[in-house]
Amino acid sequence: MKYSNVFPKTKKTAPTGAESVNHQLLVRAGFVDQLMAGSWTLLPLGFRVVTKINEIIREEMNAIGGQEMLMPLLHPKEIWNETGRWDKAAEILYKLKDSREHEYALSFTHEEIVMDLLRKHIQSYQDLPVAVYHFSTKFRNEPRARSGILRGREFMMKDLYSAHVSEEDLMEYYEKVKEAYKKIFKRLGFEIRVTEASGGVFTDKHTHEFQVLSDGGEDTIFYCGTCDWGVNKELMDEKIDTCPLCGKKDIRTGKSIEVGNIFPLGKWYAEKMKVSFTDETGQKKPVWFGSYGIGPTRVMGTAVEVSHDDRGIVWFPQIAPFAVHLVSLPGGEEKAHVLYETLQKNHVEVLWDDRKVSAGVKFGDADLIGIPLRLVVSAKTGDQIELKKRSEKEAKLIPLQAVMSTLTGT
Amino acid sequence: MKYSNVFPKTKKTAPTGAESVNHQLLVRAGFVDQLMAGSWTLLPLGFRVVTKINEIIREEMNAIGGQEMLMPLLHPKEIWNETGRWDKAAEILYKLKDSREHEYALSFTHEEIVMDLLRKHIQSYQDLPVAVYHFSTKFRNEPRARSGILRGREFMMKDLYSAHVSEEDLMEYYEKVKEAYKKIFKRLGFEIRVTEASGGVFTDKHTHEFQVLSDGGEDTIFYCGTCDWGVNKELMDEKIDTCPLCGKKDIRTGKSIEVGNIFPLGKWYAEKMKVSFTDETGQKKPVWFGSYGIGPTRVMGTAVEVSHDDRGIVWFPQIAPFAVHLVSLPGGEEKAHVLYETLQKNHVEVLWDDRKVSAGVKFGDADLIGIPLRLVVSAKTGDQIELKKRSEKEAKLIPLQAVMSTLTGT
């Protein structure tokens, strides 16, 4: 894509009051725009990043038998009332009434709605297990929307739901999802700590959170520096000395961002909502239920929090909006054009800054936008190309042919 | 995918009160589920169809320079008030108030919100034109939700918005979108009539609708049997005799389904909302604006309305959930397994009915689900495969190798 066509362009300054790094950089670089507190437009560059994040999540959900679907966002009060969460989650639920005096909640989450779907379609043990997921919008009336796109009042979530004949089957799948989540976050570029946490308005049981250590985080976790053990501070009054898992005295404290959460919900929802199946002996039994969430927009914000410098974003290559940022300077336009066409033909995603602005402006914008590889062609570069990785300081002059064969794999 | 895993399975009967063909067949075949009047879950099979529809639309939007993004669904009253549509569209708007007494509308459409975005990012003529689109959720408080998924209270829409420096530039792009829409609907499998229509709460100007002739439609159009002329009945008190375009006396009347609508909105929104740019001479001028919509879920319903028989859906191949419906009968399981693996390896999308149920049940479900090509393997078929197109009556026995090379292109 040519940068002259991209909507919108970079901004010199961050919006007033933007405290968090992801807010400052994503807005300045043109990835997101704030409609109101906690509510964001994914601009074309940001949409590209989230699409890549979603594709990685989708592949791993499909790999564990998840079936993608899409559920409504406007939910009838009657269904939320069945579990009592119409009242229990009242603080965070957006509610409305239509002209026919029907009452609705906006999708704060989808457990009740999935359960309603399951009870219409599941009769016997042969219909189980079921694992369905969607990428959809969540609405949460947060008292204070903050931290840029990390805590929104309206945001995207991938939520997976699974239903099973027994606790054993649920917990076996729960572990499978945990492994899939670890794989997803590794593929996304994060170092993850899996921590125990409370279930909030979802469940009385403990749950597992996927935490990324970051100074920009709102959570605090205790974790072992030697093994995998970790726990959210909310579950512990005081920091302990010795790791309960490996016994080492290596417990650390860190600020962190929760990017995923999995809930072994058990029979509670099925019992409240009468979602049952007939087992092999003809007995009616409640369905065992789990839910599993990742916030793709929060993932984008987290990536910026953990990978940036004072000049801008440093995207992990797998979720970068483009693979190559091509900069043409005077005398290099023609060569840039050939390069651009060739890269596109070979399915290398390239953003070409074809504007008539100074080298300084182009370099500044390239650093701010954060695409992993910058190529510069000008009168000066001759038969070579100046190549610089966003994560490194030094640029190198490389023969055109060498760059092309590396990028296109030919 | 194995049909034994698909959630949910087919149903023998249509829901009570389901009058329209798309409602009956899409529910029975397991493509959609009704949460409440006008509100539908896209089940895994339905989600596959809509994904294919969206991909065709996306390709053509990108081809005319559209940039994909994603906008919020909860809109502040203040912005809707700027055009007066907070009141003007009150009948169809869902409104709510949060605990801080802020008022919102749910996204009935996005003109105001796009305009708000544009005025924050556009300064000069050099920032124009802009064309941005998204696939997102629309909420419309329809007095009567009906016709299955054709008229919902919550549904998916692809909406494109374009902004220009002049009426001339807007109308040039408007014609480009019109051609792109014709191409999209042709690729989707429809025969389209482009008709003039009124602008409703969007504009005082005439607009263009993309209509598919169908007895299941809610609209009535007059159209010329000889040339391309057409008009929505709402614009004409009486049917005319002679075509105003070609002069032939060949005007016909038909029930039809509106699958797309394009609006040359002009300067009205920019003037109300003060969205301006500076032209070459330094003068401030209002932006020229257009919006362009297609309802992908309505497209799915329309495809069923125009392509089905008394046994079920007959999907157009390009939007079918799978390319091949593989049916294994006793003695054919092993061969089916090899076939299934080979087709998947060659990226042919195949649904394998691997259940232990009768041939009659499998054939009935295959007809109901409507995948374009059915392959049957059993003890009887020997080294051959029974092949039947969903749109034809006769099955043929074909050598395995011939089927494979046709399907995999090898």
Image (cartoon, coloured by chain):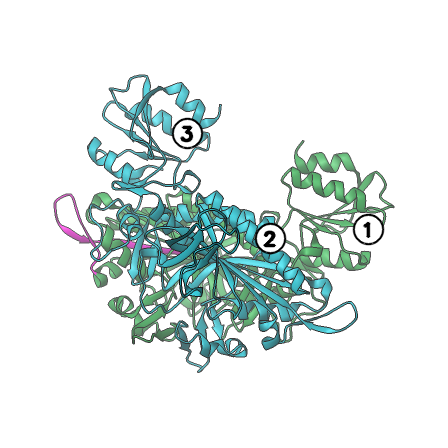
Chain colours: A green, B cyan
How dense is the environment of label 2, judged by Cα within 10 Å: few (below 14), some, or many (20 and up)?
few
As measured in the structure, the alpha-carbon distance from the residue carrying label 2 to the one carrying label 3 is: 39 Å
Q: Is residue B315 above or below residue A301?
A: above
Q: Is residue A211 visible?
A: no
Task: Give whichever of B136, B393 is nearer the camera.
Answer: B393
Residue on which disc 3 sits: B343
Task: Give whichever of B46, A267 is nearer the camera.
Answer: B46
* Residue B176's disc number: 2
Residue on which disc 1 sits: A329
Residue A92: image location, x then y, percent: 39, 72
Q: Quadrant of residue A342?
A: top right
Q: Amino acid at mark 2?
A: Lys
Q: Amino acid at mark 3?
A: Leu
Q: Are marks 2 and 1 in contact (CB under 8 Å)?
A: no
Residue B119: image location, x then y, percent: 63, 71
Write down the region rendered in magenta.
A274-292
Q: Is residue B104 above or below residue B324?
A: below
Residue A195 shown left or right of residue A22 in the figure = left
Q: Is residue B187 above or below residue A84?
A: above
Residue A324: image location, x then y, percent: 68, 47
